[in-house]
Amino acid sequence: MWGSFCRLSTLAGLLPLVFGAAVLGAPQNGFLAQYKGTPYHDSRYQGGAQKIPGKVMCAYYDLGGEGVAYHDSDPENHGSGELNKPDGSYLNEFRMHEGVDISYTKFGRTPPIDDNPFSKVMPPADLLYVGWTEAGEWFNITVDAAKAGEYTAGLLYTSNRGGALLLDVNGEPATGPLAIRSTFDGTDPLEWRQYHHWKLAPNFVTLRLPKGKSVLTVRILAEGHMNLATFDFRKAE
């Protein structure tokens, strides 16, 4: 059901690949005092750190630009303003002048795009997500945990070839490499739609967070070509 595992050759020298590694602590090392990024906000999303427990939107990564809030392999947004042509709409032009590549789920098209029968879970319509990922890219998300403790997050994503992520908390590695299992489905007759087979990994990662604000860094380690939509955080059992 999961498809094939990601190839591991690009992870040589890294920690063993795991599914849902938990960090033992999130040290306070002055990172937050020096960090120049700020929580995302715009006319629709009023901003502030994204709340935990709750759904954390990848597309609402921090403000601050290249090298501060994110690193992308090129300065062009290949979703907003390119694939999704500028037309004055919020979704097509969302953060189109930043390097992180962003698109959104599209329903009711012919042929079906994100509401296709090959998805394992149906995402919400018009859901913004980070896409076109490449190994070495990263983005920061400021979060606000209601209480100190361990939180487990499910990941809503697509990946036509598998891959791997790593998460930092406040500038320190918080997990080993986390495998992304492929959502490839050979029965789909449309090759381009392999990028739109949505899957929920319900227990993707467990993190220990301090109470209050932290900065999560999502690092793309291997393969890329993933669409990352939301991390749904809940208290670990």
Image (cartoon, grey):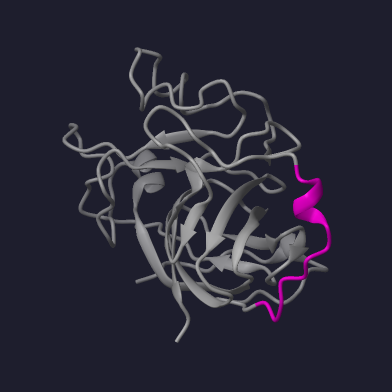
In the drawing, does residue 181 fall left or right of residue 183? right
Residue closest to the far top: 87
On screen, residue 201 above or below 171: below
Q: How many marks overall?
A: 0
Nearest to the observer: residue 33 or residue 155 = 33
Q: Quadrant of the N terminus?
A: bottom left
Q: Position of residue 12 (x, y in %)?
A: 79, 66
Q: Which residues are magenta?
A: 23-35
Quarter of the image for residue 173 reads bottom right
In the drawing, does residue 198 fall left or right of residue 178? left
In the drawing, does residue 192 fall left or right of residue 171? left
Residue closest to the far bottom: 237
Quarter of the image for residue 128 reads top left
Q: Position of residue 236 (x, y in %)?
A: 48, 81
Q: Position of residue 56 (x, y in %)?
A: 46, 55
Residue in view at x 47 percent, y 20 percent: 82
Q: Assess whether residue 123 is covered by the magenta stretch.
A: no
Q: Position of residue 178 (x, y in %)?
A: 61, 68
Residue in view at x 53 percent, y 69 percent: 5
On screen, residue 74 above or below 115: above
Residue in view at x 53 percent, y 73 percent: 147
Residue in view at x 78 percent, y 66 percent: 28
Q: Quadrant of the C terminus?
A: bottom left
Nearest to the observer: residue 134 or residue 192 = 134
